[in-house]
Amino acid sequence: MENPVLIFGAGDLGVQALDIFRRNNVLVYGLLDDHKELHGKQYGEVSVLGDTDDTAFLNILGEKCEAFVAIGERSVRERLVETLTDDHKSMPVNAIHDSAVISDMAVIGHGNLVAARVTIGPKSQIGHHCLIQTASVIDSSAQIGDYVTIGAGAIINDRVKIGDGVFIGSGAIIVAGIEIGKNARIGAGSVVVENVAAKATYFGNPAKKV
């Protein structure tokens, strides 16, 4: 990546993205966050510059500066992505840790965070603006929708289909061929052995509807 990056979000996720970009020798222009108490805070040589809607910074996006949205709350992430893509014609870039192992036969969309030691297998498809956390595994031929969160150490086995907006807790295991509907939630440490309907919440081993 040749252009510097402006990170939206200066909390833990923003710092994680900052670390990933720095490890990849990508210049980070700064961070933006709506929490006033963070303004002026420095992470090394990188500062929290202002609010996420500050036009002075938004106007630099485009040919000479990229954006990355590092906010965990999905509704806020969606709103910011819509603002960036519609109003500023800036599609967020990926933040991919240098220790992640991604098959050349996998397909990855835009705006995703792929953390340390993540494995993504061949023929898997990752949508846009997902958070794929530390040491999680996405096996071959899995399909992951947009705005999906996959917690640290989760295992998504082969041929699993995960709809948009799904949350999968840390350490969860989704067995091969399972389908998880849009906006469903899977509790941490759960083992999912049956299909999960849209908006449902499952927890336990084996996971049952809550």
Image (cartoon, rainbow, N blue to C red):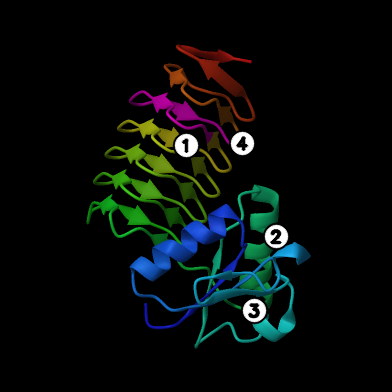
Rendering coords of residue 134 (x, y %): 39, 44
Predominant SS along the magenta part: loop
Badge 3 is on which residue?
A: 88
- Is residue 174 rendered magenta in the image? yes
Q: CA distance from mark 3 to mark 2?
A: 13 Å
Q: CA distance from mark 2 to mark 4?
A: 17 Å
Q: Is residue 63 above or below residue 189?
A: below
Q: Earlier in the sequence, mark 1 or mark 4?
A: 1
- Residues at discs 1 and 3 in contact (Cβ within 8 Å): no
Within 10 Å of disc 3 (Cα), the crowding (few <14, some 14-19, many 20+) is some
What label sits on residue 183 in the rendered view?
4
Within 10 Å of disc 2 (Cα), the crowding (few <14, some 14-19, many 20+) is few
Q: CA distance from mark 1 to mark 4?
A: 9 Å
Q: Earlier in the sequence, mark 4 or mark 3?
A: 3
What label sits on residue 79 in the rendered view?
2
Circle 2 sits in a helix, a strand or a loop, which is it?
A: helix
Q: Earlier in the sequence, mark 2 or mark 4?
A: 2
Q: Nearer the viewer, residue 44 or 115?
A: 44
Badge 1 is on which residue?
A: 162
Circle 4 sits in a helix, a strand or a loop, which is it?
A: loop
